[in-house]
Image (cartoon, rainbow, N blue to C red):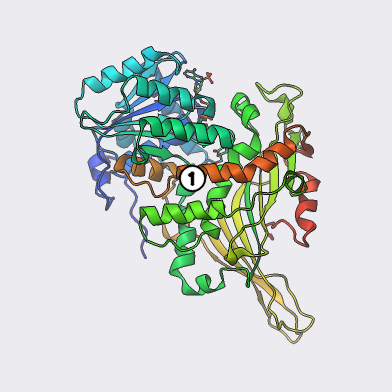
């Protein structure tokens, strides 16, 4: 398989690069992004729009409007995002980092960025949007809610009050809602009910970028397109599963958002459950959008809801303290000095599904840890009739999503020589070796699918609610408890090691 060619920077035009893509550009639309001065927009959404533009997947007539209460003009907004994009691509460790920006592609998108200063709670902001749409009869519109979850209901209600959800004038109207989808089961149910008062399900896009990462989408392919994997993918052969999203960065400038959210709500019912669903789901009954969405929803529904005392025993919350030259969480901006918000969580889950009887799933995520890695480790059982007195360790499949996708099998072998002993080897595939320069964050796919009306990767209402149902006991168990401390730059709380060691396992670590 040969790698796709990269657009040359010199003299490239949008048209030149468009030829690189086998897919048509998404239908033109006005994309209104709420929370335009925020971290997500700068760090992920706009770079992803740029990549779509570079790859010929964003129509030339698509215009982007940022809405936020911070002061800015169109030009200041463009300049700020331009600086950010160039900074981002200079840092090889950042998502998409190290890629070169094709100036013609960025210029083409830059000119189509606009800024509407407004408060999400102010009806005038929606009149500004209505005016833009009125100038383009029949235009499509996507409203992207890149705000903290506290604003989702307000914005949807205001959009509806201003008549902006109504598709009667020809173009489509879609609402994309970031995670966390609510803050608990009750708020997720209220939000779904509000959405259904004003929109059809086909207009609703519940966003979770972990679902759209290339590596996540590869899990189903590896399972269902390789008969040998399919045959072993069950409790008879799998001993346990670990799903980890480990980050080295602290909360940075997001203290206000993060302190209200915490690691559990920020990452578990959404991102980590998306990965769990890919590992645990049954093959879709029909190979279409509805089939995949249902299979994923059923996998989340199968997570056993634990009694509160069991949930406490099966979880560990942590908060980073100063260490290794880094300040502690309580020293971050906009974090109260006595905050008990967790920056780390580990949970032990089980599934009520014949395929997974007796197989524990350990999930963990945290900030300010010793390494950045999002990984899934599937540990296989020892053979029933193994070699006598010989074990070099369990067979494991290690799927790494970030910082670089890889698929590795840890395997026992016999090293050469006269002594009979077992050794270990790793059989590894790195997709980047085949497809270099294809940086993507998941947002490229989500934006393209939202514009083209493909909902496969977007969680259903039932899925979001089932996730909160499973998370509720952990929320209750920790709401009045202080998290355990762990030093910044290290591996998380010792109590999380105890959690998994209790079952005779250890958290996976890279061997080098
Ligand atoms: N950042 C990330 O890495 C990721 C974030 N997400 C999700 O994206 C969403 C947004 O996150 P993030 O970008 O980090 O959040 P931010 O807080 O950085 O961005 C929100 C923006 O909205 C502005 N704002 C706040 N209140 C109002 C208001 N009443 N009217 C108008 N503007 C207002 C804020 O301004 P100000 O701060 O000046 O008040 C800020 O510019 C969250 O739901 C998050 O879970 C998802 C994946 C990754
Ligand atoms: O949604 C979020 O995700 C990021 C992690 O995403 P990644 O693609 O960079 O791994 C996390 O840092 C952030 O706190 C959370 O809101």
Tell me which residue sits at (60%, 43%) in the image. 469
Give above or below for 21 relative to 67.
below
In screen coordinates, is 401 left or right of 304? left
Q: Position of residue 474 (x, y in %)?
A: 69, 42
Residue that mark 1 sits on: 462
Question: Residue 138 at what x, y percent from top left?
Answer: 20, 29
Cβ of mark 1 under 8 A from ligand 1 = no
Query: What x and y, as percent, mark residue 425?
Result: 64, 71
Indicate the quadrant containing the N terminus: top left, top right, bottom left or bottom right: bottom left
Q: Residue at x 48, y 48 (%)?
A: 211
Residue nearest the observer in this picture, 490 or 93? 490
Classify residue 174 as left or right of residue 99: left
Q: Nearer the viewer, residue 61 or 90?
A: 61
Q: Quadrant of the C terminus?
A: bottom right
Q: Quadrant of ligand 2?
A: top right
- For the point 41% across and 62% down, the residue is 285
Can residue 149 be seen at all in this image of the molecule?
yes
Residue 370 visible (yes or no):
no
Q: Is residue 138 left or right of residue 299?
A: left
Residue lying farthest bottom? 418
Q: Which of the 4 image quarters holds residue 33?
A: top left
- Depth check: give the residue in front, 16 or 210: 210
**SS under mark 1:** helix
Q: How many marks overall?
A: 1
Query: Residue 124 appears in which quarter of the rendering?
Result: top left
Residue 362 vs 27, above or below: the answer is: below
| Mark 1 residue crowding within 10 angstroms, few (<14) / some (14–19) / many (20+) | some
66 relative to 458, above or below: above
For the point 20% across and 32% down, the residue is: 170
Q: Position of residue 478 (x, y in %)?
A: 73, 37
């Amino acid at each position: 398989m040969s790698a796709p060619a990269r657009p040359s920077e010199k003299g490239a035009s949008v048209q030149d690069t468009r030829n690189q893509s086998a897919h048509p550009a998404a239908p033109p639309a006005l994309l209104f992004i709420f929370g335009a001065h925020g971290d997500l927009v700068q760090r992920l959404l706009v770079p992803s729009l740029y990549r779509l533009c570079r790859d010929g997947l964003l129509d030339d007539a698509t215009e982007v409007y940022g809405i936020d209460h911070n002061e800015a003009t169109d030009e200041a907004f463009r300049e700020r995002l331009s600086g950010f994009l160039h900074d981002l691509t200079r840092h090889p460790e950042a998502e998409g980092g190290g890629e070169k920006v094709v100036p013609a592609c960025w210029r083409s998108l830059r000119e189509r960025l606009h800024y509407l200063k407004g408060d999400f709670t102010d009806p005038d902001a929606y009149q500004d949007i209505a005016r833009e749409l009125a100038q383009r009869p029949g235009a499509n519109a996507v409203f992207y809610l890149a705000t903290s979850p506290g604003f989702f209901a307000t914005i949807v209600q205001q959009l509806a009050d201003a008549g902006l959800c109504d598709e009667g004038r020809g173009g489509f109207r879609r609402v994309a809602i970031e995670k966390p989808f609510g803050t608990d089961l009750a708020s997720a149910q209220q939000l779904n009910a509000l959405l259904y008062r004003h929109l059809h399900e086909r207009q609703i896009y519940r966003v979770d970028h972990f679902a759209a990462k290339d590596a996540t989408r590869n899990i189903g392919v590896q399972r269902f397109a390789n008969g040998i994997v399919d045959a072993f993918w069950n409790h008879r052969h799998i001993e346990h599963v670990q799903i980890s999203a480990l980050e080295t960065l602290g909360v940075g400038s997001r203290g206000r958002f993060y302190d209200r959210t915490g690691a559990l709500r920020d990452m578990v019912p959404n991102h980590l459950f998306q990965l769990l669903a890919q590992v645990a789901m049954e093959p879709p009954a029909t190979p279409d959008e509805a089939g995949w969405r249902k299979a994923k929803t059923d996998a989340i529904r199968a997570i056993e809801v634990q009694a509160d005392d069991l949930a406490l025993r099966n979880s560990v919350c942590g908060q980073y303290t100063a260490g290794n030259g880094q300040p502690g969480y309580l020293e971050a901006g906009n974090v109260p000095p006595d905050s008990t918000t967790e920056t780390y969580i580990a949970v032990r889950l089980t599934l009520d599904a014949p395929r997974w009887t007796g197989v524990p799933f350990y999930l963990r995520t945290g900030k300010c840890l010793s390494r950045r890695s999002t990984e899934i480790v599937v540990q296989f059982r020892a053979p029933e009739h193994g070699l006598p007195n010989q074990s070099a360790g369990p067979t494991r499949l290690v799927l790494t999503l970030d910082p670089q996708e890889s698929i590795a099998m840890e395997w026992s072998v016999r090293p050469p020589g006269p002594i009979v002993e077992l050794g270990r080897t790793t059989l590894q595939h790195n997709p980047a070796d085949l497809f270099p320069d294809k940086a993507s964050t998941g947002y490229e796919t989500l934006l393209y699918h939202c514009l083209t009306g493909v909902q496969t990767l977007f969680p259903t209402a039932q899925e979001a609610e089932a996730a909160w149902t499973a998370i509720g006991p952990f929320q209750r168990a920790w709401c009045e408890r202080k998290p355990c401390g762990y030093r910044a730059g290290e591996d998380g709380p010792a109590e999380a090691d105890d959690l998994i060691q209790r079952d005779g396992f250890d958290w996976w670590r890279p061997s080098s």
